[in-house]
Amino acid sequence: MTGSGTGEHGDGAEERAPGPSDGRDDAGYAAAFRRAVEEGLASLDRGRRVPMEDVRGIIKEWVRQCGRGRKA
């Protein structure tokens, strides 16, 4: 459901999802990931949905950001 929360695509969870460059150690990353998943599931329980095409765009952006700075 677009525009129903704080983010462009819903409740803003996509902006809060942890990434590999956020400076967290493995345990911190796992905890942040778990919180992000729990928030996403709670959002679904509240009836907030993100269209699949939007999800594809969000994932492409994450991949682009994660690939930045890597040496081939």
Image (cartoon, rainbow, N blue to C red):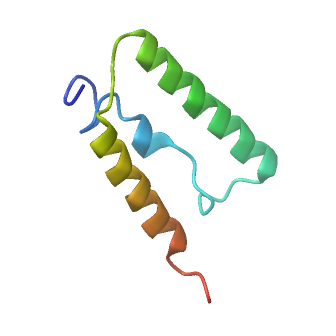
Quarter of the image that includes the C terminus: bottom right
Residue at screen point 38% across, 10% down: 46
**Horizontally, is 33 left or right of 55 in the view?**
right
Residue 1 appears at what percent x and percent y? 24, 25
Residue 7, above or below 68: above
The answer to which image quadrant residue 71 occupies is bottom right
Residue at screen point 43% across, 68% down: 64
Name of the residue lying farthest toward the left: 3
The answer to which image quadrant residue 37 occupies is top right
Residue 20 appears at what percent x and percent y? 63, 60
The answer to which image quadrant residue 30 occupies is top right
Residue 1, above or below 13: above
Residue at screen point 47% across, 41% down: 16
Residue 46, above or below 70: above
Residue 29 appears at what percent x and percent y? 70, 46
**Horizontally, is 17 left or right of 21 in the view?**
left
**Horizontally, is 56 left or right of 5 in the view?**
right
Name of the residue lying farthest toward the top: 46
**Horizontally, is 59 left or right of 7 in the view?**
right
Name of the residue lying farthest toward the front: 52
In the rendered picture of this protein, how many numbered marks are placed on residues? 0
Name of the residue lying farthest toward the right: 27
Residue at screen point 22% across, 22% down: 4
